[in-house]
Image (cartoon, rainbow, N blue to C red):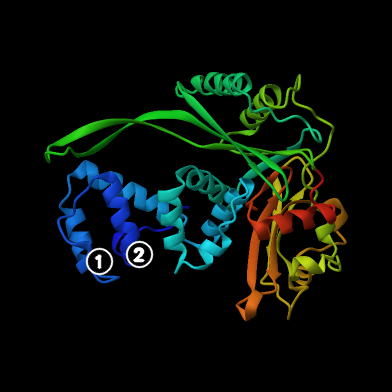
Amino acid sequence: MARQYSAKTFLRNVPNALLKEYFDRRGVDLGFNWGMLHETDVNPIFVAMENLAEGVRSEIDSDFAMINDLACEDGTIAILEEAELWNDDWSDLFGGMKNAYERAMWTFLNNPKRFRVAGCFHEMDRVGGWRRRFVGNYLESRSDEESLAAFEKSLRLFYRRQGRGRFCHVDVYLRQHPERHCYFAYPEDYASTDIGYDDHGRFQHRARRSAFEIIFVYRPEEGLLELRARGNKRQIAEMEEIFCKTILGLVQLPDDGRVPFDLAVLKDASFPFQTDPADRVTSVHVRLLRFDVPGPLRRRITVSAETSDMAPRALHQLLNDAINQSRMPLSGLHVSQAKLRFTFEPPNGDRPKTLTFDVTYPDRCTLRDDQHDQIAKKCLKEWGIARA
């Protein structure tokens, strides 16, 4: 979800010098002397923007909303990560700036390519709902024009069956620590019609054909393909196969029998949840377990509790109270979903960082891709929960 954009808040936090540079580059004269404005004196700028033509104002708001999205700590980290890939060390430069708004605006003005890629990284880091499966370790991840053209064509054909996807564009980025090959695909979506006004204030219907985003991530060290896309099980498998054939050069979608997630160990109330001290994880708690009951009818039992350091076994105690295990032993129940909560040691005496996420059998996880989520993914692997 994008950060909430407020024009006045944005203008108040971006230095006037950078705002002036932005408007000068666009060739927009707001009709006042910038030298007479004090910092945070946003009303003259806001009023002047309101008087611009509707089309120009919309373009400016669109730019400012994108910059606003990266005007946060995570956005700064994403920008620095992309700069590091190109051996650009902006840490001292950024350290001298007054806030994340200045850092984001400076990047937008001075290196729009780094800004655009950082925006994609930031999007990866904050979205969940990933599907994952094992496809093979250290496969060649292609990014040549021929392979990307074949990938785009296959995605177009896939979505044409749904009445959309006439066009498709794919961007490719490399992320490190750990190594990830990221493919952002943008197929054309269904046509839609907006009701609005043109530059002359005429009320009208305007047709629009937008794109939607699909993210494919290949992790060579783990041999994993992660996919964030909408679709049922068959559609997801078909998209995975398209990627494996066109980008990884496989003949077909591999199936080595691995189930991405196995949650059985969470039945054990005394499971140790061992972590690396360097990861600064202070506690891990199970806050929800969902069990599938075997039998001809689909039956489920969901147990949740506010576990904490004061009551680390609260959920399992409730589980013992709720289920008559002489009639329905835990060994016969299948854990199909769990909610886990990680607490991290805070830096510099700040408040502890918490991370709560769901893991659903066989292949769904709401973990994202930022620093703390990467630690959680590593832990799931070490505990035997992530099997692929």
Query: Is 305 placed above or below 224 here?
Result: below
The residue sitting at 74% across, 70% down in the picture is 280
The quarter of the picture where residue 20 lies is bottom left
Q: Is residue 30 left or right of residue 291?
A: left
SS class, disc 1: loop
| Number of dots carrying numbers | 2
Residue at which label 1 appears: 42
The residue sitting at 51% across, 37% down in the picture is 213
Q: CA distance from mark 2 to mark 1?
A: 11 Å
x and y, in percent, of residue 76 in the image = 53, 59
x and y, in percent, of residue 28 in the image = 22, 48
Q: Nearer the viewer, residue 56 or 23?
A: 23
Indicate which disc, 2 or 1, sits on the residue closer to the N terminus: 2
Q: Nearer the viewer, residue 304 or 191?
A: 191
SS class, disc 2: loop
The quarter of the picture where residue 3 lies is bottom left
Q: State the quadrant of the C terminus.
A: top right
x and y, in percent, of residue 192 in the image = 33, 32
Residue at which label 2 appears: 15
